[in-house]
Amino acid sequence: MGSVVTQITCGRQHTTAFVPSSGRIYSFGLGGNGQLGTGTTSNRKSPFTVKGNWLPYTNQCPLGADSEEFYCVKKIFSGGDQSFAHYSNPQNMVPPDDFRYPDFLKQIWTVNEAFIQKLLSFPSGRLPAEIANEIDGTFSSAGCLNGSFLALSNDDHYKTSARFSGVDMNAARLLFHKLIQPDHAHISQQVAASLEKNLIPKLTSSLPDVEALRLYLTLPECPLMSDANNFTTLAIPFGAAILNLEKAPQKVLENWWSVLEPPLFLKIVELYKDVVVHLLKLYKIGIPASERRIFTNFLHTAFRVLEILHKVNERGQVIQYDRFYIHEIPDLIDIRNDYFNWVQQQVFGMLTDIPVTICTYPFVFDAQAKTTLLQTDAVIQMQMAVDQAHRQNLSSLFLPVFESVNPCLILMVRRDNIVGDAVEVLRKTKNVDYKKPLKVIFVGEEAVDAGGVRKEFFLLIMRELLDPKYGMFRYYEESRLIWFSDKTFEDSDLFHLIGVVCGLAIYNFTIVDLHFPLALYKKLLNKKPSLDDLKELMPDVGRSMQQLLDYPEDDIEEIFCLNFTITVENFGTTEIKELVPNGADIPVVKQNRQDFVDAYVDYIFNKSVASLFSAFHAGFHKVCGGKVLQLFQPSELQAMVIGNTNYDWKELEKNTEYKGEYWADHPTIKIFWEVFHELTLEKKKQFLLFLTGSDRIPILGMKCLKLVIQPTGGGEGYLPVAHTCFNLLDLPKYTDKKTLKSKLIQAIDHYEGFSLV
């Protein structure tokens, strides 16, 4: 209204303001309790004068001013549904306060540079009482910590909202590390005591405002939280306070976490991972029976905080999912036993005598632990199948109506009809038999399946099924990946077979050569493919979709000329398919472009291949169904099926064993490794294929790939020979590098199955 205001106060739903030039108070908002001072209980939408004989402040007493009738405002106050003012009489006027110039002596304590310098200026030892009180007051008060570390650039902290914390996290980290130092242990002790006894126990589930959440963001930066001595007194109670938050404030905190810099987010994850390891170590040493219940609560708290952080990370990846792995877990607990307990809990509900099943929080298991879980599940399933077979065989001794049952799943196939034979055998196979150990016999060959024949079977059947002659899959040149072809004439049996083969490969710990995108494994785990998956399979289309989403102007319809349809090739002709009902009549505009991209992704990965994927899914889950799959991330499942390409050729050399006359420093072995390390990556991968049946390595890495090299007679004119069953190489005693290289490459290039032996 053109007047300078020097004081403003707010109640629950009303505001008062003071104008010094007229000495008047103005008010607006709700007035139901008379808090506006207008003489009525009406609400006011705009400022209105508070009733009273107000005088502006002057240096001298105004003439004729009766001290009983006039008031000069000193300071105004509001709170709840109340308002009042301090005033002085005209005879002894006091200047009114000016809120525009804050009095630093009257502000709350905060953690800032000056405060820390003041504390560090005292020699180590006892602190003066008033300084100890200031530390205690600051670190016992949620208000003091929420007012600390504010983002001051462009007054960012005034923009605090459900999406923006208003906190300068780097300032928080810096100041906390300056304050908590080994040389000033007396300060650290006082801070820890205040946090433990006063601050954390008083944190409540419901908060007055988003600003009151700031300490939940900054406190993990305090080095005291990461000290193992304080886990049970600070980190775990603080974690319990996070879990105790009501839904709305917890959602805000999750939003703030999701936009943290990766190192800051990782700091909180690492804190609660360390708490878990600390507790599990204590448990391994032994916990008294009287303390087990509280210990279980502590462990649940740490895991549940990690679970929330993991959920935040899944929504928008802040850090790599493997940063949640706790590699120490296999050494601290019996993973197999934990899995048994978890399966029991799934079937029978919560069991009181089982403390915490870590399988409930599978994101902490690394590849090695998950492989153990898969093996455990496979052993349980296979053992059940074998036991049933043995029981049936025992019954058949007395009751001839039962036919004898083999404890293995036997696949007898001909090389020249591998697909037809496999389909025929697997079609007759009962579901329970899929869980048995797989033995493969190639008709007319003597090789005993100790694992190698099985590996070759997977390799050959996959190569056959992916052959373009079947037209089951479409190959994408740019990404070198395949996806289901919606134009195939093959029936769903073959897709079912591929699903079964993938499942058998996992169950029998054999990796297969299958160039599907990650979307396949997402779908197997009931997760939705996204635009990122389209970018992986069809990079050019994915880039175009991203450009559409990023386009800043409103003229999308004119520039992109799109509607809710997709153009597909159909045996040399093009066909237009609608992505939604009447899609041809719906133009893509700024408001619906995300819907268009979502519908496009859904068509490629779901709608267009629904029946084919359904058959694949059924085949896969026939073998690999069960609870254990719930523990995997899509990329982890992918690595279980096709292995990975984290090659470490030195590790391969280090783990190789030698037989007969050979040892690591034998002249032939030394030149063999010289030649091998000089090969191109493609030739090295071909060597792996030649020797092991696959050019990829198991999920656990090269350390699990053990090669054996033995000498063979016959002289330098002979080729090296691979026994794929045993990863065994027969290497003639070559004496010069050139010959060895020539013979090795010749053997690699002519490899095709056991016929070479």
Image (spheres, helix red, strand yellow):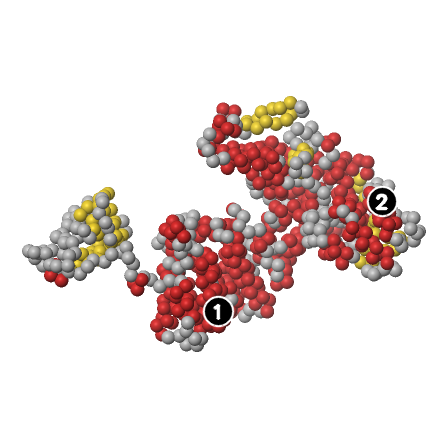
Residue 579: name its quadrant: top right
Q: Residue at image x 51%, y 32%?
A: 596
Of labels 1 and 2, the one closer to you: 1
Residue 336 at x, y = what percent? 64, 57
Closest to the observer, 54 or 60 = 60
Local secondary structure at mark 1: loop
The amino acid type found where label 2 is placed reads Gln
The amino acid type found where label 1 is placed reads Gln
Farthest residue, direction left = 64
Q: Are marks 1 and 2 in contact (CB under 8 Å)?
A: no
Q: Residue at image x 57%, y 42%?
A: 527
Residue 255 at x, y = what percent? 45, 49
In the picture, measured across the screen, residue 199 lies left or right of residue 474, that is left
Residue 68 at x, y = what percent? 9, 58
Seen in the picture, residue 271 relative to 431 is either above or below; the reply is: below
Residue holding disc 2:
746
Residue holding disc 1:
181
In the picture, measured across the screen, residue 504 lies left or right of residue 163, that is right
Farthest residue, direction right = 714
Closest to the observer, 664 or 342 = 664
Q: Earlier in the sequence, mark 1 or mark 2?
A: 1
